[in-house]
Image: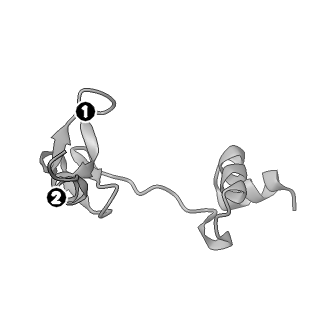
Amino acid sequence: MSLRQKAIKLGVPYSTLLYRIKAGWDEKELSKKRPIVKKGYKICSICHQTKTYKHFYKRKTRNGYFSRCKECAKKTTPKGG
């Protein structure tokens, strides 16, 4: 089976499949898709919990909020900087 056929079978774009294979993803993870998040919610990049925007600090670029929730940002930010 060619990579293009495998991408179609797994339901992911060909370029995504190529990236995941080169990055060394496990065979079971190749067809993994991003979770659907409701409007007004965001997934924290550290704890991976879905939270409302009020749990994230504001940001002037991108979508307007940081990727870490306030709790995780406090835990990972060095003190006295």
Depth check: 27 or 47 in front?
Answer: 47
Q: If the image is split into quadrants, where does the N terminus sit?
A: bottom right
Residue 64's disc is 1
Disc with the residue nearer the chain's start (1 vs 2): 1
For this view, does 30 lie left or right of residue 59? right
Label 1 sits on a secondary structure element that is: loop
At 29% from the left and 64% from the top, the residue drawn is 47
At 64% from the left and 63% from the top, the residue drawn is 30
Look at the picture and state if 40 lies above or below 3.
above
At 26% from the left and 42% from the top, the residue drawn is 66
Displayed quadrant of residue 10: bottom right
For this view, does 34 lie left or right of residue 76? right
Q: Residues within 10 Å of mark 1 (few under 14, many from 20)?
A: few
Name the residue carrying label 2. 71
For this view, does 77 lie left or right of residue 8? left
Q: Between marks 1 and 2, how big is the CA–CA gap?
A: 18 Å
